[in-house]
Amino acid sequence: MALIRNLMHLGLRVKDFDASLRFYRDGLGLEEVFTLRKRTLYDMLAAEGNPVPDRSDEDDVWLGYLRIRNEQYLEIFPVPKEEVSQFTDRQSFFHFSLQCDDIVATVDGIRKRGILVSSLHVDALADRPVPECFDPVKAPCRSRIAWIKDPDGNLIELMQLMPDSLQRGKDRPEEG
């Protein structure tokens, strides 16, 4: 039995919570599940007998949770203003990937929502959009891909697994 069942969530630190929420919720169509304020964290710390910092920012957002699908989520954490200057154009990881059923329809829908879509990650980094007549890139793993960036410059790969995708050959039947 595998110790790890699923990618539960990815947590991203973001410069502008509202811009990131709009990007993931309105642009990509993820469902906003909940937003927690710092007062929740402070109340939890106090209830456990831990020291609580100055509560003057207790109405500030602590984190937002968005549903990709059941049991798969994205967390977004606003970065304190004093830490924003530490961000670079590229964050500490390369990218994450979101699976779609139809890459052409997904790219069309995302472009209609005003998000720049690129063919390759190097195109996304350079803000080069896909051609008007989008022809998905066929990755070496035989999947179809496209790329986008969130408001903080994090690369996101959009991927459609194909029947002959190498990942499919490694899938296991769902365990009950």
Image (cartoon, rainbow, N blue to C red):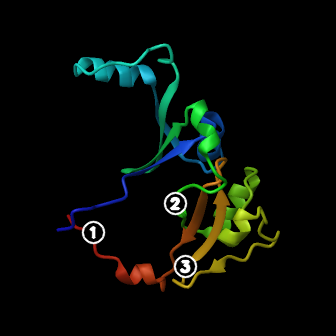
The numbered mark, 2 or 3, whose residue comes first in the sequence reads: 2
> Which residue is under mark 3?
143
Circle 3: element type: loop
> Which residue is under mark 2?
93
In this image, 161 relative to 121: left or right?
A: left
Position of residue 141 relative to residue 86, above or below, is below
In this image, 171 relative to 95: left or right?
A: left
The residue at the point 46 percent across, 24 percent down is 37
The residue at the point 61 percent across, 46 percent down is 87
Q: Mark 1 or 2, which is nearer the eye?
A: 2
Position of residue 173 relative to residue 37, above or below, is below
Extreme-left residue of the structure: 1
Residue 127 appears at what percent x and percent y? Answer: 77, 61
What residue type is disc 3 on?
A: Ser
What residue type is disc 1 on?
A: Glu
Extreme-right residue of the structure: 132
Circle 2: element type: loop
Circle 1: element type: loop
Q: Between 72 and 79, which is closer to the camera in this rendering? A: 79
As drawn, the label of residue 114 is: none
Q: Between 51 and 110, which is closer to the camera in this rendering? A: 51
The numbered mark, 1 or 3, whose residue comes first in the sequence reads: 3
Q: Total number of numbered labels?
A: 3
Asked whether disc 1 touches disc 2, contact meaning CB atoms under 8 Å apart, the reply is no
Residue 123 appears at what percent x and percent y? Answer: 73, 69
Query: How many C-alpha atoms fall within 10 Å of the one at disc 2: few (<14), some, or many (≥20)?
Result: few
* Quadrant housing the N terminus: bottom left
* Quadrant housing the C terminus: bottom left
> Which residue is under mark 1?
174
